[in-house]
Amino acid sequence: MKDVIASPKLHDCRDAFVAVLERLGADNPKVVAVCNDSVGSSKLGGFKSRWPERLVNVGIAEQNMVGVGAGLANGGLLPFVCGASCFLTGRSLEQIKADIAYSNANVKLVGISSGMAYGELGPTHHSIEDFAWTRVLPNLPVIAPCDSIETAAAVEWAARYEGPVFLRLSRVGVPDLLPAGHRFELGKANLLRDGDAITLIANGTLTHRMLKAADLLSEQGIEARVLNMATVRPIDVEAVVAAALKTGAILTAEEHSTFGGLGSAIAEFVVAEAPVPMKILGVPGIFAPTGSAEFLLDEFGMSPAAIAEAAVALIARKSSRA
Amino acid sequence: MQPNDLDRIARQIRLRDLQAVFEAGAGHIGGEMSAIDILTALYFRVLRIWPDQPKHPDRDRFVLSKGHVALALYVTLAKRGFLPEEEIGTFLKPHSRLNGHPNCTKVPGVETNTGPLGHGLPVAVGMAKAAKLTGAGYRTYVLTGDGEMQEGSNWEAIAAAAQFGLDNLTLIIDHNRFQQGAALKDTNDLAPFRAKLEAFGWDATEINGNDMDQIVPALERRGARPHAIVAHTNKGHGISFMQDKVDWHHKVPNAEQYQIALTELSEAL
């Protein structure tokens, strides 16, 4: 793991998504892509050139896009509805609720460029509310893969799963962390590093930062457990409770508001099942300033060094309780 | 089935709908009465459906986008054999699957969940597009309210349907001229609809939506473009004191009014 972290080759997870989508499309003529003029930003150019009729571009009309996705599924197709996550979830939230989740439509929603991938474009284009908006909806698994390997595995899984799915992808480069051939399991966290001083939990673009922070902690003689938790709903309650009981403190980090996201979802179970000191890192409930995603993550205390510092402070709280 | 028979069934559905609203103490009776002739023509003449196989892949699709008139759909589905007729008595009762807006995960014959307005037409566009992509022969019908057409999502879908060349899609606008709180013309008057729909690339026809002799041929019309039927209807149609009264959007008749309405509808049977 250390070699990967030390000299990472970074991957855009959209490439893994479309590679699998095109493989699925070749095997199954029912696979269709739906988009809102986002052929380029969703990287659907290859799909379009191979199967132009199966690329359903509704234009800049996200409410219609999601409804059309539900109708395509009703007609027996397997639609992957793709758009910038800020618009897909924000503009069409009621369609996601009624047409997809409540109707239990077999539609795969793919939020592209989520989090602060569009950092410089400002808060209208940040999608740091999407976990909160989607994870309250019944029937809708919410998944944020941490690397290209997990992205590919999650897309394969979503195509096999009968029902709605929300995949939250980024365009920000991340190193491969999971082993080649990894199979995605809904609601199952991946133990990336073991330790008993504290548990660090993240997903998406934060998982590799958590691993770097664990390295820094290890240099100080602190061994942290690191869990990659792509599934925000349903939460891996077993892994969360085990982490609380075994390590006594949980630090989460996410490219999302600190309100209502991964950390909140974990906290809901920690308070009920195994209360321990917790800290949730993310965007602290404000509209973020201008800057790249990497800059903003650092700005909000999610550089590896800052994460390590937060971990040390949390461990101190744990000790003071003992 | 011929228009005379359809009229008789529509009156029976009106009567059962009225009884269920009175018993449940709730419902959207005005819009139910305006839409029942259209629902009857669809379910007893036009739609290719198999009540014992509600998910048959070749079935025609019908989407009730004005989901608040769910009761009229339930009564129609029950009469057509999708539900036990006695189940209508559970409408709005605790744990009944017949809630105030139709749920496709529980009620056979319902295709998609509606309730919030402006949802059914985009989904219907997806259904019709799926048939184009797969070569399926089914046709898709969607019923919206006229007030509902104020939702922008409908116009996104109307534009897309024309762009996709969906000649297998029929939109029926239940143009009863009233929305929940006021007349359409005093709120956000989209009428006249026909020219707007034609400008978007649709074929459009205008009919009396409470006249079977006009409803059936309009629903059976086939053309080269998506087809919109602007169905001029009367809110509360069939019950004299409800007709064209905005109050009857979701008012419930009292005992005296109920008796009058029962008598009127029964006489018509």
Image (cartoon, helix red, strand yellow):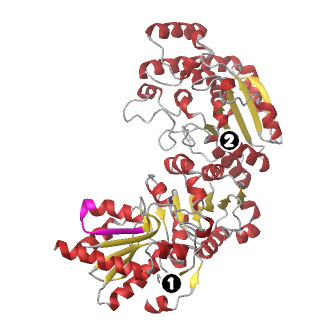
Q: Residues within 10 Å of mark 2 (few under 14, many from 20)?
A: many
Quarter of the image holding residue A117? bottom right
Q: Which residues are magenta?
A: A271-281
Chain on which label 1 sits? A
Name the residue at 52% across, 77% down.
A147
Q: Nearer the viewer, residue B146 or A71?
A: B146
Locate residue A83, reporting x and y percent: 63, 61
A69 sits to left or right of A128: right
Q: Residues within 10 Å of mark 1 (few under 14, many from 20)?
A: few
Q: Amino acid at mark 2?
A: Asn
Q: Is residue A165 magenta?
A: no
Which mark, by number, is residue B154? 2
Does the rendering let one see residue A293? yes
Which residue is the site of mark 1? A180
Name the residue at 64% across, 53% down.
A62
User: SS for tag 1?
Assistant: loop
